[in-house]
Image (spheres, helix red, strand yellow):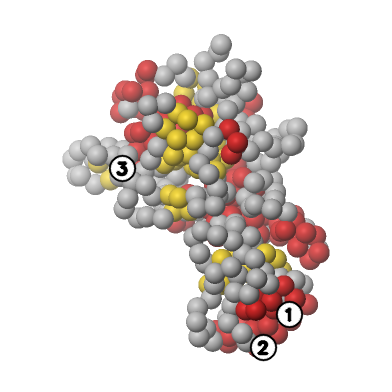
Amino acid sequence: MINPKVLIIYTGGTIGMINDPETGALKPFDFESLYASIPELKQFDYELDTFSVDEPIDSSDMNPELWADIARTIFDNYANYDGFVVLHGTDTMAFTTAALSFMLPGLKKPVIFTGSQLPIGQIRTDGKENLITAIEMAGMKDMSGNSVIQEVALYFEFQLYKGNRVTKISTFNFEAFKSYNYPLLAQAGTNIKIDHNSLYRSQKEELELVTNFNSNIALVKLFPGMPIKSIKTLFDFSKVEGVILETFGNGNSFSSPEFEKMIADYMESGGIVMNITQCAQGNVVLGLYQTSVHFKRLEVISGRDITTEAAVTKMMHVLGQTSDQKERIELMTQNICGEVTI
């Protein structure tokens, strides 16, 4: 069998930083000396290539244009590699993995994101293990020669998560991510244990590149006593084409005729509204309680068990595909690439 070929793409973030021996300051990692810095990689029967973006960034500066650049790099190199590992800052990694799941429909190879809480040059870094195992998973094939992982995923601290079902939960623990509403794709111990029932398989025959995202959206987190006037400007269709509401519990909100009218008027003008829960675990069930009946009556979209990261990137994706309100609502209610349980 031919040795797997994996492309490592560096976008920025803590994992790619090392201490300058003269100043002690952190500086970008030199991927030309990858094997010298991580000699364990020499034990792989893999062929590894590296690619670094022109200007590595802190992930807080990530945006749809940069998501598209990453997706395009994968698309352009798709035929030449068995898998891809993307090194990315942890702060917005879950947004990027969700975004790329929508940008790369028809994916039949692994795109595994990873990073670290400590720079790869530090003695106690978690970056080495994260990178080594992410690479191993990116090259895994089954007995038929097909990739075991065929989707965008996120590997961190011995666990592989579905890319559009994960969220960052800690700024300091090595266990920085969690997937509350979807099982792990794999767990790394003495062996790598794959949960084959959780793996996604696209029904599309060929890989596509869909990078047209419309970011004219708003994310509104409700709180008790919220004055409606403080968010009215967000419900202006000439400026914001879609609104995501983070509501209480199973999708509930305060009772307010003014709030209901604002949503109704906004949707009448062409906007779409999605309701997702503020809770880390669980899902929206419109009409379960009286305090969510108005959302059901207004035909607000139920986000079910979708994460905030997936809801944001899904809405950007959908708004970029069509300007028709009915089509947008229909697409938002669908399970496009495994991002929501229906």
From the viewer's perspective, tell me whether residue 18 is left or right of residue 188.
left
Residue at mark 3 to residue at mark 2: CA–CA distance: 51 Å
Name the residue located 45 percent from the left edge and 44 percent from the top edge.
88
Choose top left, top right, bottom left or bottom right for residue 297: bottom right
Which of label 3 and label 1 is nearer to you?
1
The alpha-carbon separation of the residues under discs 3 and 1 comes to 49 Å
Which part of the image, by quadrant, shows the N terminus?
top right
Residue on which disc 2 sits: 257
> Label 1, on which residue?
264
Q: Amino acid at mark 3?
A: Pro
Q: Earlier in the sequence, mark 2 or mark 1?
A: 2
Image height of 150 relative to 313, above or below: above
* Front position in the image: 240 or 291: 291
Q: Amino acid at mark 1?
A: Ala
How far is the residue under mark 2 from the one under mark 1? 10 Å
Of labels 3 and 2, earlier in sequence is 3
Q: Local crowd at mark 2 within 10 Å, few (<14), some, or many (≥20)?
A: few
Residue at disc 3, secondary structure: loop
